[in-house]
Amino acid sequence: MRRILVFVVVGVALLAVLLVWFSPSERPATAARSGMQEQAPAVLTKGFEIKDGRRVAGPAVVSVTQGTLLELQVVSDRDDELHVHGYDRGQALSANEPGTLRLKLDRAGRFEVELHGAHRTLTTLEVSPQ
């Protein structure tokens, strides 16, 4: 009887060790381990409409976390240039045609997005540290 009890206890302990050993880890699998390709980071898209040099649609402030991939989609009724201060990135805007500027927000801080021709702030980026 004692041998059976020892056998059962050892068997249960062995099953517990195997269960822990082969349980999925809480870390996500890397592309190399899983054999899958890494997915591209999600893109946050914010749209804006400009009439007579003023924003008529779109947020006054865009709050994001550092590392975000942001896409600004802008339609203006006039030719202009979109410029992101602090990143020194720009995009020419042709009247009534969508213009898109995509950038990775790798710097924390507060940055103005300006319409150069109209000399107006389109929106402000508030980038929080990770």
Image: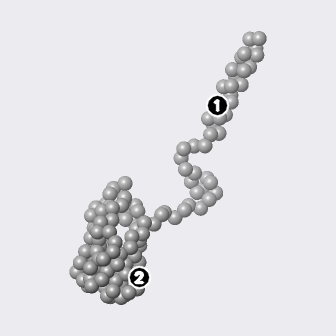
Location of residue 21 in the rendering, given as x and y in whole percent from the top left corner? 63, 37
Disc 1 marks a residue whose amino acid type is Val
Residue 54 found in image quarter: bottom left
Which mark lies nearer to you, 2 or 1? 2
Residue at which label 2 appears: 98
Above/below status of 96 relative to 86: below
Placement of 64 over or under 16, stated as above or below: below
Q: Secondary structure at mark 1?
A: helix
* Quarter of the view holding residue 34: bottom right
Is residue 56 in view from this perspective? Answer: yes
Image point (57%, 51%), residue name: 29
User: What residue is drawn where x is 57% and y is 43%?
Assistant: 25
Q: Outermost residue, front direction?
A: 56
Residue marked by disc 1: 17
Q: Earlier in the sequence, mark 2 or mark 1?
A: 1
Q: How many marks?
A: 2
How many angstroms separate mark 2 from mark 1 (CA)?
59 Å
Q: Amino acid at mark 2?
A: Pro
Q: Is residue 88 visible?
A: no
Instruction: Give the farthest residue toward the top.
Output: 1
Q: Is residue 8 left or right of residue 61?
A: right
**Quadrant position of the C terminus in the picture:** bottom left
Question: Closest to the observer: 51 or 46?
Answer: 51
Task: Quadrant for residue 6, please give it.
Answer: top right
Residue depicted at 62% across the width and 59% down the height: 36
> Could you classify mark 2 by the number of other residues whose Cα lies within 10 Å: few (under 14), some (14-19), or many (20 or more)?
some
